[in-house]
Image (tube, rainbow, N blue to C red):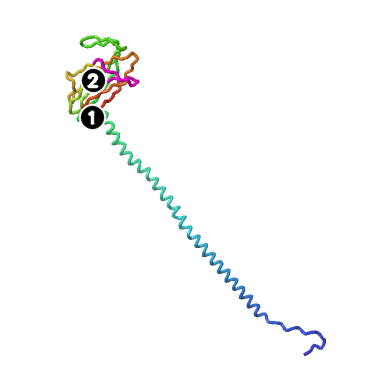
Amino acid sequence: MSNPYGVPSAPPQKSRTGLYIGIACGCLLLVAVLVAVVGVGLWLFSRDGGGEDPTSGPSISQSPSEDPTTEEAPTDDPTTEDPTDDPTETPSEDPSTDPDSSAGASISIQVSAPSEGATLDTQDETLETENGKFIGVEVNLTNNGSEDIGLAGKNFRFYDDAGNEHSLRYASFSTSGPQVTPGEEATAQLYADVPTDMVLKEISYTDVVGTGGEEITFPVG
């Protein structure tokens, strides 16, 4: 049918159904891709996060578990040290009064304060000093062992405050023999001829039986 007024007729409209379907498919595809990407990301994140937590967990729990172990160690040490110290001190004190218990003898010695003088009166004569003065001490010795111990001038030595040794010039003893029997107490008067400025610090006693041959010293006074 022709247009009587000479105006061209409008072209027929095309169907847009295919376009809409394409757009919808594209949106669904985009959504599917996003979902896949998000899912993969969450899986990777959960995998990485789950691997670190167990690793850090034991390392933290081990630290406190080790602390009590180290704290308990010092508490155990003093407990074992206290009993150990007591037995150790007890034997160390015994040898001081028992120089040679293995030899079957023990002694106790007490030394008086020293006396000084220019002359020394003995039972037989009066001795004059040759070095400056006489210095002497009285020694009480008790044999607490089961064997005889020696008692003679050669068993004793004098030592001054500088550590110098001085031999005896005269000695007298309360016992008649050169030995002290078990259970016996003896007194010794010991004298040395020494320089005037000599200061007596200690004496020593040595005996094969009484001290096992070892020299032991005792302070004067």
Location of residue 154 with respect to 61 vertically, above or below: above
* Residue 6 on the magenta span: no
Label 1 crowding class (10 Å Cα cut-off): few <14, some 14-19, many 20+?
many
Q: Secondary structure at mark 2?
A: helix
Q: Evaluate whether residue 221 shows in this view.
A: no
Label 2 crowding class (10 Å Cα cut-off): few <14, some 14-19, many 20+?
few
Residue in the picture at 27% in, 18% down: 167
* Mark 2 or 1, nearer chain start: 1
Which quadrant, please, contains the N terminus? bottom right
Residue 19 at what x, y percent from top left?
66, 78
Q: Are marks 2 and 1 in contact (CB under 8 Å)?
A: no
Q: In terms of image quadrants, where is residue 202?
A: top left
Task: Name the residue carrying label 1.
Answer: 100
| CA distance for labels 2 and 1 | 19 Å
Which quadrant, please, contains the C terminus? top left
The kind of residue tagged 1 is Asp
* Highlighted range, magenta: 154-170
Task: Name the residue carrying label 2.
Answer: 154
Residue in the picture at 60% in, 71% down: 30
Residue 204 at what x, y percent from top left?
27, 23
Location of residue 90 with respect to 216 vertically, above or below: below
The kind of residue tagged 2 is Lys
> Is 13 in front, or is 167?
167
> Is 59 in front, or is 160?
160
